[in-house]
Image: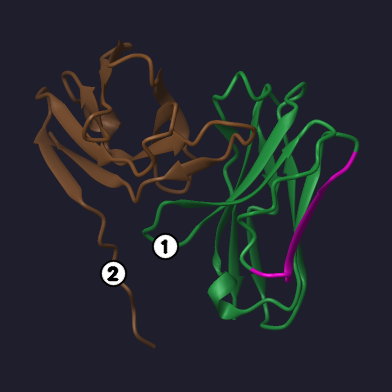
Chain colours: A brown, B green
Amino acid sequence: GESVGLHLPTLSVQEGDNSIINCAYSNSASDYFIWYKQESGKGPQFIIDIRSNMDKRQGQRVTVLLNKTVKHLSLQIAATQPGDSAVYFCAENFGGATNKLIFGTGTLLAVQP
Amino acid sequence: GAGVSQSPSNKVTEKGKDVELRCDPISGHTALYWYRQSLGQGLEFLIYFQGNSAPDKSGLPSDRFSAERTGGSVSTLTIQRTQQEDSAVYLCASSLDVVGREQFFGPGTRLTVL
């Protein structure tokens, strides 16, 4: 049968460099955003979140920036390490009574030693 | 264990058969979610349970899909008359409540329909 290739956007960085992963979200009414990291064969792992009343939030080695004007979210990883290699997903919560997350298609981060 | 657990980790079935996938959420988490992830894709929302409220089933792709949550804890996702396009990784997540929105994911069940 025909095989389907993996067509994730890929970001390749050198170990020690900073990484920036971008995401465009769809709903201007979304009030909560999360970045998840997914390693091969595992479920997504929470990295950092941000609410719509903020434009920046920092964690350990990671920073999330939110630009509501253009519906853009970015994840910055400082001093990228080989262990950071994974697929990164942004997700948005539309708010209201439901708590379901709408995920982006993901970006593959490949860290070169 | 401390995390979300799912069983089985892998399931291979024949087209037309029914399958049941199980999720054990983190103890004390009132909200439970099912998502589906096809190869190379993001996660697709299926269904959401919150406490005793009626579940949000808006993501279920067809009436062959159903889910229940017994006693506010364990959940089972059932797919009847499986089709090849149902092949995917099915992920379960739980969270404390609507306010505590961080969702903790299990490792998933990889379903392959032959």
**First to last magenta residue range:** B62-70
Q: Which residue is drawn at 82% across and 34% down?
A: B73
Label 1 Cα neighbours within 10 Å, binned few <14 / some 14-19 / many ≥20: few
Q: Nearer the viewer, residue B32 or B105?
A: B32
Q: Is mark 1 on a helix, strand or loop?
A: loop
Q: What residue type is labelled 2?
A: Gly
Q: Is residue B26 left or right of residue A8?
A: right
Q: Residue at x 66, y 70 (%)?
A: B62
B74 shown above or below A17? below
The percent position of residue A78, horizontal first and vertical second, equals: 18, 18
Q: Which mark is residue A5?
A: 2
Q: Which mark is residue B39?
A: 1
The percent position of residue A43, horizontal first and vertical second, equals: 51, 41
Q: In this view, does B37 lie to the left or right of A18?
A: right
Question: Residue B60 falls in which quadrant of the image?
Answer: bottom right
Q: What residue type is labelled 1?
A: Leu
